[in-house]
Amino acid sequence: MRIRFTASKAPAAVAALAALTARYGQADGRVAEVIVALGGDGFMLQTLHAAHGQRLPVYGMNCGTIGFLMNAYAVDDLPERLAAAEETVIHPLAMRAENARGRVTEALAINEVSLLRQGPQAAKLRVSIDGRVRMEELVCDGALVATPAGSTAYNYSAHGPILPIGSDVLALTAMSAFRPRRWRGALLPSSAVVRIEVIEADKRPVMADADSRSSVCDVIAVEVRSEPAVRHRLLFDPGHGLEERLIGEQFT
């Protein structure tokens, strides 16, 4: 099996890269059959985005902190682990954000698209689903749209629901909602188009972000939808796949 190793800059990941390439070699990206990512969840997201054009499966080995998207790190028996690994396919979100100067930024997010207040005052947001206004005014620190794969990340910290990996559902979650008081969000079909407009954008500036990779300041409107045409392939050791982890996370 031709393996392409990639690693974050963390010392543990750099050491793991040296050990694994010494043992198994380093395949050229043009002939590789699988990518092995060494690092934490943030680096895994980075690798998945970078591997999109190659359409290669990515097998993560945890050299970071939490490693929710990763497998356990070990040098031995890697070809056997890769051969036995189970594949999970996930689809990202597509973000289209317009700022106050009329500039439009488009980006993909595997975990979530989030809107966050930029200043000391709470944001005022208008929420529309599929062209219909569902909430005229949401006063909050921010709001996010999360995929099932990302539902245990920022979404879960904001008290949003954990979504089964096979569900055709997105989570719309508010952060520190002030009005409506304690509004926690909504579950939406994956086909939904979510549009969030910023009210009083000059007084209450808001930024948008896709997976902490593509930040846009002073947004006036953000549109989010699932992008089924893009497929990210993740590999997990048998019995430790993403679906099992999403279930297990709810009982810890």
Image (cartoon, grey):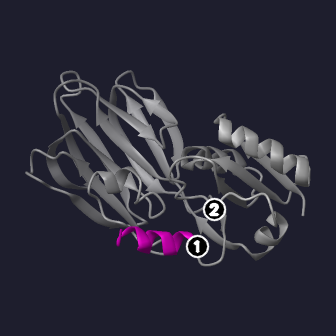
The tag on residue 6 is none
Looking at the rendered structure, the kind of residue marked 1 is: His
Image quarter of residue 8: top right
Residue 70 place in picture, x, y as percent = 60, 58
The residue under the point 77% across, 54% down is: 35
Q: On the image, numbered disc 1 is attached to which residue? A: 240
Decide if residue 138 is in sight here: yes
Going from the N terminus, do you reach mark 1 or mark 2 first? 2
Using the image, determine if residue 203 lies above or below residue 144: above
Looking at the rendered structure, the kind of residue marked 2 is: Asn
Q: Is 242 situated left or right of 216 in this image?
A: right
Q: CA distance from mark 1 to mark 2?
A: 8 Å
Q: Is 67 situated left or right of 161 in this image?
A: right
In the rendered structure, are the residues bearing label 1 and label 2 in contact, judged by CB atoms less than 8 Å apart?
Answer: yes
Using the image, determine if residue 233 lies above or below residue 204: below
Quadrant showing the N terminus: bottom right
- Give the secondary structure at mark 1: loop
Q: Is 232 situated left or right of 149 in this image?
A: right
Residue 89 place in picture, x, y as percent = 61, 67
The residue under the point 40% across, 67% down is: 249
Using the image, determine if residue 65 lies above or below residue 156: above
Question: Quick one: label 1, few (<14), some, or many (20+) residues within 10 Å?
Answer: some
Nearer-the-camera pick, 244 or 151: 244
Residue 43 place in picture, x, y as percent = 61, 44
Q: On the image, numbered disc 2 is attached to which residue? A: 71
Question: Quick one: label 2, few (<14), some, or many (20+) residues within 10 Å?
Answer: some
The residue under the point 66% across, 34% down is: 9
Nearer-the-camera pick, 65 or 46: 65
Identify the magenta region: 240-252
Decide if residue 131 is in sight here: no
Nearer-the-camera pick, 138 or 235: 235
Residue 173 place in picture, x, y as percent = 28, 54
